[in-house]
Image: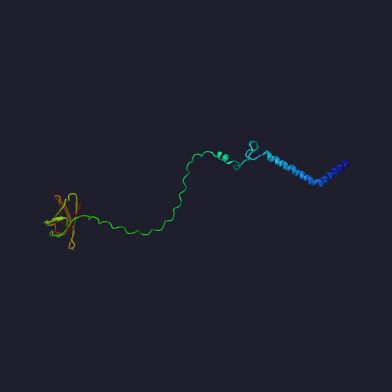
C-alpha cells in the first residue's frame, strides 16, 4: 500500500514538472486545435444553411424569419365582431352663460281692424261715430235701425249702452236682430223691462 502511494506521487510530480517546462507549447497547441475546430464548424454551416433538422421545435422567434415567411404567417381578416353595449350616459354639463340680446326685429305690417262695421248713436238716433253704416234711424221708443253697406248675414252683432260723455245710469239690456241682409235692429230695455231711449255702441263682426 505504501509503495503504490509513493509511485503515484512520483508520477504526479513528473507530470507537473513536464507541464511547467512546456506550458507555452501546450497552450499554443490547444489554441491551434480550437481554431481549427471553429473554422471547421464555420465551413460546415455556411450562411442561410440551417434546415428543419437543425432547428429545435419552438426555438425560432418571429424576427428569425424572413419577411416572406412572416407575411405568409398572416391569415385573412376575420369577420367583424358584434357591436359592444352602449356606454353609460355622461354627466350633464354646466349651463352656459346667457347670450347677448339680439337686435330688434323689423316692425311687422299693421294688422287689420277687428271690424270695419261699427256705429255710436245718441239716444235720439244721431250718429256720432260711423264706419260702414249708410243709415241710422230711431223707429220708436228704445228701438233703432242701422243699415250697413255690405251683406251681414253671416256676421254677429255686439251692442252696449253708453256714450263717450257718460251720463248713462241704471241697468239696461240691449237686444239685437237683423232685417234683410244689411240692417241691424237694436231694442233697449231698462230693469223693469220697459223700452227706453239710451245712447249705445254697435259693432258688427264678420
Total marks in image: 0
Q: Which scheme is used to colour this image of the protein?
A: rainbow
In the displayed structure image, the side of residue 47 where residue 96 appears, left or right: left
What percent of the width, then of the height, locates residue 147? 14, 54
Residue 45 lies in what quarter of the image?
A: top right
In the displayed structure image, the side of residue 86 where residue 21 appears, left or right: right
The one of 102 and 140 positioned closer to us in this rendering: 102
Query: Given the current orientation, which residue lies at the most extreme left position?
Result: 140
The residue sitting at 81% across, 46% down in the picture is 22
Q: Quadrant of the N terminus?
A: top right
The one of 177 and 128 positioned closer to us in this rendering: 128
Query: Given the current orientation, which residue lies at the most extreme right position?
Result: 3
Residue 119 lies in what quarter of the image?
A: bottom left
What percent of the width, then of the height, locates residue 36? 72, 41
The residue sitting at 79% across, 47% down in the picture is 24
What percent of the width, then of the height, locates residue 149? 15, 53
What percent of the width, then of the height, locates residue 44? 68, 38
In the image, residue 202 above or below residue 79: below
The one of 126 and 25 positioned closer to us in this rendering: 25
In the displayed structure image, the side of residue 113 where residue 100 appears, left or right: right
Amino acid at each position: 500500500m505504501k509503495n503504490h502511494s509513493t509511485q503515484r506521487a512520483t508520477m504526479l510530480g513528473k507530470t507537473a514538472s513536464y507541464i511547467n517546462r512546456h506550458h507555452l507549447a501546450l497552450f499554443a497547441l490547444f489554441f491551434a486545435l480550437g481554431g481549427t475546430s471553429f473554422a471547421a464548424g464555420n465551413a460546415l454551416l455556411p450562411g442561410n444553411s440551417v434546415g428543419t433538422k437543425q432547428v429545435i421545435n419552438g426555438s425560432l422567434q418571429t424576427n428569425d424569419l424572413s419577411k416572406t415567411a412572416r407575411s405568409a404567417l398572416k391569415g385573412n381578416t376575420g369577420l367583424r365582431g358584434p357591436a359592444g353595449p352602449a356606454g353609460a350616459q355622461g354627466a350633464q354639463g354646466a349651463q352656459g352663460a346667457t347670450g347677448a340680446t339680439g337686435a330688434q326685429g323689423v316692425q311687422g305690417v299693421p294688422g287689420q281692424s277687428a271690424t270695419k262695421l261699427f256705429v255710436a248713436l245718441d239716444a235720439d238716433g244721431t250718429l256720432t261715430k260711423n264706419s260702414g253704416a249708410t243709415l241710422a234711424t230711431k223707429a220708436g221708443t228704445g228701438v233703432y235701425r242701422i243699415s250697413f253697406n255690405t251683406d251681414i248675414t253671416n256676421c254677429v252683432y255686439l251692442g252696449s249702452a253708453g256714450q263717450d260723455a257718460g251720463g248713462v245710469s241704471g241697468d239696461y239690456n240691449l237686444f239685437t236682430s237683423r232685417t234683410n241682409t244689411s240692417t241691424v235692429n237694436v231694442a233697449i230695455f231698462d230693469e223693469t223691462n220697459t223700452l227706453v231711449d239710451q245712447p249705445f255702441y254697435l259693432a258688427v263682426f264678420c
